[in-house]
Amino acid sequence: MKETTFVKKTVEFSKKLHSDIVKKLLVYERLDSTNSTAKELARAGANESTVVIAQTQTKGRGRFERIWESPGGGVYLSFILRPQIPAEKASLLPFVAALAVSRTISSYGLHAFIKWPNDVQVHNKKIAGILLESEVNKHTINYVVVGIGINLNIDIKNLPSEIRTKSTSMISELGHPFDYYEFLTTLFKQFEVFYSLFIKQQYERIIDEWKTSTDTLGKTIRVHTSAETIQGVAFDVDQSGFLLLKTEKGEIRKILSGDCLYFNEL
Ligand code: BTN
């Protein structure tokens, strides 16, 4: 698809899209990072449900300062959200986004699993990533940017070798390309479903749904946090989405955030 065609087609698509979660879709051929643009817009006062989408990114960002490879054929977008809920509940937003993405991918017949907190994997390989960036004032959320990258029509052979073995895509899994706009429509619907549960403060529902979609619980894992590396059995998540781990010594540790590795990935 030519870049100009992408912008035209996506703008046309947005005109027909009647979605509460996408009130305004800002379309770009190429951006450094949809999250960076969304953050600038949020700081300048952009409304809730403004969504930034790009055909490619030149400096796509992942968690832990990693690069998110963003060639043509992938989905790269960022939601600007301003949920009117206590800031301490924001820790469940990664679950909301991961559920929307995993359910969308699963609706195409693939078994997508969530790796705590919000990586989406198929056959133990990463197919999508989510990056949340927020600004909180005391106890209220000013904005949250939820950035989503999905390997849709990306031939994994074209990704750099260091991530090729750990990554997969929809086209590589199922052997045929997918309609980008049909996929976006499903993703937006699923995001709306789970975000509306969040707004209605149905936090337990979100956690229960997340538990049915994760393959982390029950596994022996290693988690790198900013302070340490912890190993143990992931046995539950609490009502804030924090991971509960039982170490070899039998200690129970609560992990707020970190990079989770399964043993086949070490
Ligand atoms: C991760 O798994 O490390 C998170 C990856 C998040 C990538 C998406 S692509 C759209 C948005 N813009 C970015 O720069 N990053 C997120």
Image (cartoon, grey):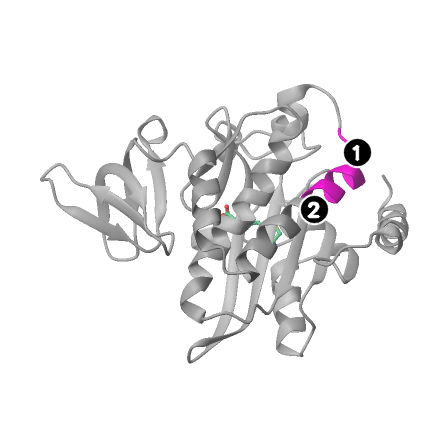
Front-lying residue, 177 or 56? 177
Where residue 211 appears, as percent x and y from the top left, is 42, 39
For the N terminus, the quadrant is top right
Query: What residue is at 47 percent from the left and 45 percent from the top?
Result: 118
Q: Which residue is mark 1?
A: 179
- Give above or below for 39 relative to 98: below
Res. 227 image quadrant: bottom left
Q: Main secondary structure of the magenta part?
A: helix
Query: What residue is at 83 percent from the left and 52 percent from the top?
Result: 17
Front-lying residue, 220 or 85? 85
Where residue 38 appears, as percent x and y from the top left, is 65, 65
Q: Which residue is mark 2?
A: 189
Looking at the image, is mark 1 or mark 2 nearer the viewer? 2
Q: Which residues are magenta?
A: 178-187
Q: Earlier in the sequence, mark 1 or mark 2?
A: 1
Q: CA distance from mark 1 to mark 2?
A: 16 Å
Res. 34 image quadrant: bottom right
Q: Amino acid at mark 1?
A: Asp
Dot 2, how many residues are within 10 Å of its Cα: few (below 14), some (14-19), or many (20+)?
Answer: some
The magenta stretch spans residue 235 = no
Residue 40 visible somewhere in the drawing: yes
Determine the secondary structure under disc 1.
loop
Where residue 69 appears, as percent x and y from the top left, is 59, 43
Taking the image as shown, residue 213 lies to the left or right of residue 127, namely left
Query: What residue is at 69 percent from the left and 72 percent from the top?
Result: 47
The magenta stretch spans residue 185 = yes
Q: Amino acid at mark 2?
A: Lys
For the C terminus, the quadrant is top left
Determine the secondary structure under disc 2.
helix
